[in-house]
Amino acid sequence: AQKVTQAQTEISVVEKEDVTLDCVYETRDTTYYLFWYKQPPSGELVFLIRRNSFDEQNEISGRYSWNFQKSTSSFNFTITASQVVDSAVYFCALGAGFQKLVFGTGTRLLVSP
Amino acid sequence: NAGVTQTPKFQVLKTGQSMTLQCAQDMNHEYMSWYRQDPGMGLRLIHYSVGAGITDQGEVPNGYNVSRSTTEDFPLRLLSAAPSQTSVYFCASRPQGGLNQPQHFGDGTRLSIL
């Protein structure tokens, strides 16, 4: 069975702090995909990144970076120099098996000025 | 480019009423799905469709029906609403070809059952 665990329910930081959101996944499939989505207070789901199981290269996009480690089944997300606009709920998701996406329970990030 | 459009955005129902949540996409995506989002539980898959005329159950299908008569539309039906179905519902679509394609989500429908 596929499972995604986001152990951090809520994180509060002050603007300009760095913050890491943890994601641990479980799957027996050798081919799978990992995703991060952002849900701002307005409620929509915004796609951030996709990673396949054969690509363990870390990725950086502006202030965002992702650390994929198959050895620990983790796909962590770091925001550098956080801003108030980063306040949102962040979901990690696992796609294994042809069609289904399994989401974690989300981490609420609060960035205060 | 509208993407994935969900209607209505908000709805209040009484227990036992029926309702259809509409979902339409204009990207010619073969795969469409419905999720519900509940506090502390993330998003859970209700039903999905890999193409017109084909639907299948997800993780939490009970109490919901779907059909896919066209590529563009994937309505979700509640035949007899129950308070446990109070949730935020998201429709999503993506091209065929597996999960290497990211899903596009609609803006959600907030449904309250009294």
Image (cartoon, coloured by chain):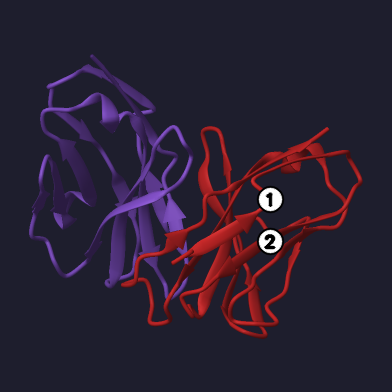
- Lateral position of residue A108 relative to residue A16, left or right: right
Q: Which mark is residue B8?
A: 1
- Within 10 Å of disc 2 (Cα), the crowding (few <14, some 14-19, many 20+) is some
Q: Colour of chain B?
A: red
- Front residue of B69/A27: it is B69
Work out how far the residue at label 2 is from the one at label 1, CA to CA, in angstroms.
7 Å
Q: Mark 1 and mark 2 in contact (Cβ < 8 Å)?
A: yes
Circle 2 residue? B22
Chain drawn purple in the picture: A
Q: Can I make out residue A1 in this image?
A: no
B71 relative to A46, above or below: below
B53 relative to B105, above or below: below
The answer for which chain carries disc 1 is B
Please determine if labels 2 and 1 lie on a single subunit: yes
Q: Which residue is depicted at the point 20% across and 43% down?
A: A76
The answer for which chain carries disc 2 is B
User: Element type at marker 2?
Assistant: strand
- Front residue of A105/A86: it is A86
**Amino acid under disc 2:** Gln
- On the image, the x and y values in percent for residue A70 come to 17, 57
Q: Which residue is depicted at the point 65% across and 77% down?
A: B55
Which image quadrant: the N terminus of chain A? bottom left
- Lateral position of residue B62 relative to residue A105, left or right: right
**Amino acid under disc 1:** Pro
